[in-house]
Image: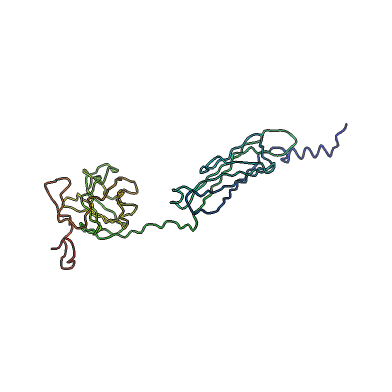
Amino acid sequence: MKIPFQAMLAFAFLFFSGGLCDGTETLKLTVSTSPSTFTSVGEKITFTYKIVGEDYISFSSGYKVTNDVADEAPVCSKVSSREMSCTSTHTITTQDFALGYVTSNASALIHVGTYNIITFRPVDLTEKATTVVYIKNFVPSPTPTITATPVPTATPLQPGQSIVIPQPNILILQPVLAGSVSACDTGLGYINLPLADPMPDLTGKNLEVIINGYKVNCAIAGSRNQLLACSLPPDRTFPLNIGTTVDSVQVDSFSFSGATCTHTVPTKEKDPNDPNAPVVPIATPVDCIADPYNPACP
């Protein structure tokens, strides 16, 4: 039997034009959610995945669909030779509710091939999709506002200024603070932090003190520059999380319970490096005529 020339030409065209597997297979993954927002802890969000293969999905070769926040593995079903549908659920947790949103990272590993007249093994393709579901009426958390109050033990610096301490050249990234509090007054809004001994060389460095997530104003105080006097942040919830950064690198981090805080300014406090030598925590002279209500004035 003779094969018509037109049939041979059609087969050649099919072979060389990509009718066979030519490595151009694609996979598409789209995700939808129901409901689109959540309102309470314990609420279930249903994720639906639409997976489309080009030209077909080889279900017999196996597949894998995952979601990093799913309560259980996604359940999938065949829609057509080139499409499958999967679903999974996520139960809203206390952490999701506190954040105001939940982020889902889905991944589909599918065997995809091209229809042709010759049998071949499909290729493995992976597609990923990220979906964020927000709490109803979601409002992003505002950036904390720094409202520094006067430091009774020293003249505060302007926001953004560096605290430069002239000391011998000691390896930076050593602790700057001693990890304790020598005085604290919640009524007047200040806290005194003893400095480390020995102190690292902070010449030309930018030192920032962060309390409960707020960058606060500080200044060196004490007779031998052994104290860092800082303003308490507007958020005075105890315990206080106190930390320092030097050129944006964290150096100190400790917690203070606040149990020893007072509501009046102590007239004197002891030098943490010399218990027998009390020092007045006022770094600069006070003009009692101009500032008669200053705690240092009689």
Outermost residue to the top: 1
Viewer-nearest residue: 252 or 93: 93
Looking at the image, residue 273 lies above or below residue 155: above
Model colouring = rainbow
Residue positioned most to the front: 42
Camera-nearest residue between 175 and 241? 241
Image position of 158 (left or right of 282): right
Q: Residue at x 66, y 41 (%)?
A: 78
Query: In percent of the image, x 60 and y 46: which residue is there?
Result: 49
Residue at the limit of the structure toward the bottom, as seen here: 289
Seen at 35% across and 59% down, the residue is 145
Q: Which residue extends farthest right?
A: 1
Q: Which image quadrant: the N terminus?
A: top right
* Along the viewing direction, whichever of 145 and 264 lies nearer the viewer: 264
Q: Nearer the viewer, residue 202 or 212?
A: 212
Residue 18: x %, y % from top left:
71, 40
- Left or right of 39? Residue 109 is right
Q: Position of residue 280 (x, y in %)?
A: 15, 54
Q: Position of residue 112 (x, y in %)?
A: 65, 39
Q: How many marks?
A: 0
Residue 290 position, x and y percent, is 18, 68
Q: Quadrant of the C terminus?
A: bottom left
